[in-house]
Image (cartoon, coloured by chain):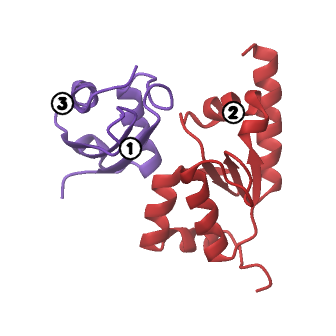
Chain colours: A purple, B red
Amino acid sequence: MAMSAAEIEDMIKSALPDARITVEDLAGDGEHYAATVVSEQFRGLSRVRQHQLVYAALQGRMGGVLHALALQTSAPE
Amino acid sequence: MSQATENQAFASIKTAVDENPVMLFMKGTAMFPQCGFSARVVQILTHMGVPFKTANVLEDPELRDGIKQFSNWPTIPQLYVKGEFVGGCDIVTEMFQSGELQTLFDQNGIAKTGA
């Protein structure tokens, strides 16, 4: 059961309400996406911690139904 | 995974990351990577010329699950430098492009092979 771009965006948004999110479907199979997430909650965090916040927002789907999510995260400039 | 198996997997992971300054848990081997993301990290490490050890999670289901719990990171590949989790394919690629990966190696005294 794949995921839609909208689903990914909604889940991230619910955990990071201030986030500006873009989600791009890489393969059209609902399993390979690229996403950029900009949120104040990332400020001062290492990249690993930032990505872990996004993975937590996806509630265990990362590495499961969601095979690949190329992530770019940052705090607002 | 039972607690006992998890402890065993954690112990062997801990040994691997402590004994190998640059340790890569991947799908496949450096010679025959079986996943594009794993292959990219191998490519980056090879290009930088640093010695590194790999572990093929496809050969060991307990390792494949254990490593994800160990680092609280849901995907493979996973790169460790001097026992510290550095990241997966995205982060390693970003750090390589920004020069942070070279700095990390320099700071940890990890020189090119034959340097």
The residue sitting at 60% across, 57% down in the picture is B39
Task: Give the residue drawn at x 79%, y 51%.
Answer: B18
At label 3, counting other C-alpha atoms closer than 10 Å, the crowd grade (few under 14, some 14-19, many 20 or more) is few
Q: Amino acid at mark 3?
A: Pro
State which chain disc 2 sits on.
Answer: B
Q: Secondary structure at mark 3?
A: loop
Q: Amino acid at mark 1?
A: Gln
**Residue B46 falls in image quadrant:** bottom right
Give residue B83's position: percent from left, percent from top. Answer: 70, 51
- Secondary structure at numbered mark 1: helix
Quarter of the image that includes the N terminus of chain B: top right
Res B63 label: none
* Mark 2: secondary structure: helix
**Residue A75, position in %: x, y?**
25, 51
Question: What's the mark number on residue B64?
Answer: 2
User: In this rendering, would A67 be left or right of B47?
Assistant: left
Residue carrying label 3: A17
Q: Is the residue at mark 3 from the same chain as the one at mark 2?
A: no
Quadrant for the C terminus of chain B, please. Answer: bottom right
Residue A23: give x, y in percent of width and height. 24, 41
Mark 3 to mark 2 CA distance (whole Å): 33 Å
Q: Is residue B29 above or below residue B71?
A: below
Residue at the bottom extreme of this rendering? B115
Is residue B35 visible to the viewer in this orientation of the structure? yes
Residue B86 visible from this viewpoint: no
Q: Residues within 10 Å of mark 1 (few under 14, many from 20)?
A: many
Displayed quadrant of residue B11: top right
**Residue A9 quadrant:** top left
